[in-house]
Image (spheres, helix red, strand yellow):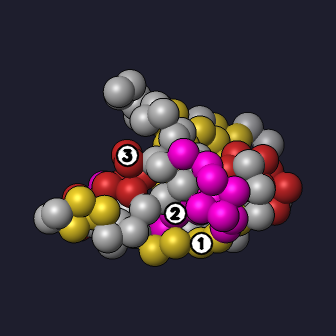
Amino acid sequence: MAQHVMKMAVDNSEKRVSNMALLVKADGTRTEITLPPTNQLSTLQSLVGGMIELVPVLSEESKKAGYVDAICNEEGKILGLPVNGTASKMTGRTGSHGFVDYIAGDCLLCKKGEVK
């Protein structure tokens, strides 16, 4: 499983730090990405491969890292997308005996205020 590296991106047009989020692919790879300032729906849909659903992050560990919301494919389970075990754990969808619920397909973990 790939480790993500924290990096900051600067939006020179507005002289502020851009919105960063963590893209968690179904294969477990994690990539820190910069979201456009407007967070256009089409951009978010392309990242998760379809219609989006906002899912609250329940994992205390992920909350401590600042993640509060996850964006996933709303129809991921219906479409038979692969189980994203990494995102399922990071969003708190697992119980002591395995999955209580799960994320299917790619998922975007966001910190407070990243998605507008």
Q: On the picture, is 74 further left or further right than 68?
A: right
State which tag comes first along the sequence, 1 or 3. Answer: 1
Closer to the camera in the image, 101 or 113: 101
Identify the residue shown where x is 39% and y is 69%.
101
Separation of marks 1 and 3 at Cα, in angstroms: 17 Å
In magenta stretch: residue 66: yes
**Residue type, mark 1 in image:** Leu
In magenta stretch: residue 24: no
Q: On the picture, is 114 further left or further right than 22?
A: right
Stretch in magenta: 63-82
Q: Residue 21 placed where, x, y %?
A: 54, 49
Label 1 CA crowd tier, 10 Å (few <14, some 14–19, many 20+): some
Tell me if label 2 and label 1 are in contact, CB under 8 Å: yes
Q: Is residue 84 placed above or below 116 in the rendered structure?
A: above
Q: Is residue 72 placed above or below 112 in the rendered structure?
A: above
Q: Nearer the viewer, mark 2 or mark 3?
A: 3
From the image, tell me which residue sits under label 2. 70
**Residue type, mark 2 in image:** Ala
Q: Is residue 18 visible?
A: no
Q: Secondary structure at mark 3?
A: helix
The answer to which image quadrant residue 52 occupies is: bottom right
From the image, tell me which residue sits under label 1. 54
Label 2 CA crowd tier, 10 Å (few <14, some 14–19, many 20+): many
Q: Residue 57 placed where, x, y %?
A: 40, 69
State which tag comes first along the sequence, 2 or 3. Answer: 2
Tell me if label 1 and label 3 are in contact, CB under 8 Å: no
From the image, tell me which residue sits under label 3. 86
Separation of marks 2 and 3 at Cα, in angstroms: 12 Å
